[in-house]
Image (cartoon, rainbow, N blue to C red):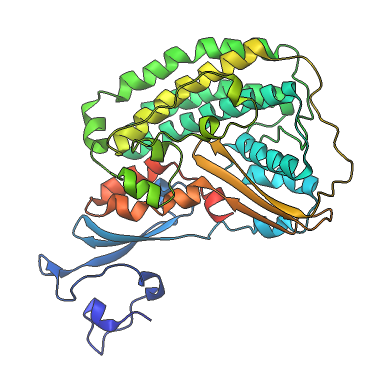
Amino acid sequence: MTDRTMFDLKPTDPKPADDKYLSHLELGEPDKTFLDTNELVINMGPQHPATHGVLRVILKLDGEKVLGTECVIGYLHRGVEKIAENRTYTMFNPYVDRMDYVAAVSNGLGYCEAVEKLLNIEAPPRAKYIRVILTELNRLASHQLWLGTHALDIGAMTPLFYTFRDREEILKIFEKYCGARLTTHAFRIGGCQYETYEGFERDVVKFLDFVPPKIDEYEELLTTNRIWLERTKNVGVISRADAIALGVTGPVLRASGVKWDLRKAQPYAAYSDFDFEVPIGANGDTYDRYTVRMEEMRQSLRIIRQAVEKIPEGPIMAKVPKVMKPPVGEIYHSIEAPKGELGYFIVSDGSTQPYRVRIRPPSFVNLQALDIMVRGALVADVIAVIGTLDIVLGEVDR
């Protein structure tokens, strides 16, 4: 129970509602006021549209200035890890699509490769290339959705229409390939169930030629826009040391100047075959995270073009037992998802079902940096910082 003196309450005053969530907020001196008004503790969310899902952020304010925050999560909890213990390895595969539902392809790649490590099998070269193409297309689609919604949060409506218009071309390719647009269940343990459809390479190359001028359009709207600069420059700054200490990964980490990308540092699938750059920022602010993601979209296009040009012939599935019983042991495997490091820790007891599955989602870990990033900022900046973290509550809560 929260100490009454922290709120400067008289004995006759009612207890504050939901005070159990305020335990870690640094509430400061009890007599500290702003314009003769007590400091405010308010809820942002879970219904607030700018929290990008059912995220509840408790804000402690001195007027418009943020003194502290606490994230309350769990409104979208579905017990995904517990479900894994009651499904076979193959049956659990589609469940991971529902975590980061904006990047379902990446979720599936990480899980399939983790189980393949456990079984000591390797997907054929052609399957690896198909995986890279679809995963990088998904990275583009994820970044486009992020840019459109992030810009909308800050007040720019036009980028939303532009990005969704162009993202539609990626979803058409996904739909032709496996019949799904959002929860794209593209991969199987051991490779890919579906061979590429007739005209797949042509459609991908057509998209590669179509989208670069569109990315330039996004930048024309925003990169030097005076309002955009005022809302993003020196907002939500996180230092290199703090980012590393908090375990932040992905574009948020790279924007703070850390050149860490699992596609380069610990290559998986066929990424070691491709030439691409890892963009980084200098200031670790909201603007740097924007520029890093914009360059990542261009690098994804570069990877996809190389993959389409060099895609090998051959089978798309390795020899996988119909009844999967991995040997007793454990494995951790991680990939560079659009939002950061997505890892799967799987423990096998030798049965057809995993003994334990632990998922390390990037959104969940990155979200803990929110408090540091918004202290001393304004309420409006909280909106910008939540957007720049690019969280999806499906993988935060699981």
Q: How many marks?
A: 0
Outermost residue on the bottom side: it is: 11
- x, y percent for residue 124: 76, 25
Outermost residue on the right side: it is: 322
Determine the image quadrant of residue 186. top right
Determine the image quadrant of residue 335. top right
Looking at the image, which residue is at 31% across and 67% down?
25
Looking at the image, which residue is at 31% across and 53% down?
372
Residue 201 visible in image = yes
Looking at the image, which residue is at 59% across and 54% down?
398
Residue 155 visible in image = no
Of 113 and 57, nearer the camera is: 113
- x, y percent for residue 11: 25, 90
344 lies above or below 16: above
In the rendered structure, the answer to whether residue 166 lies left or right of residue 359 reads: left
- x, y percent for residue 132: 63, 25
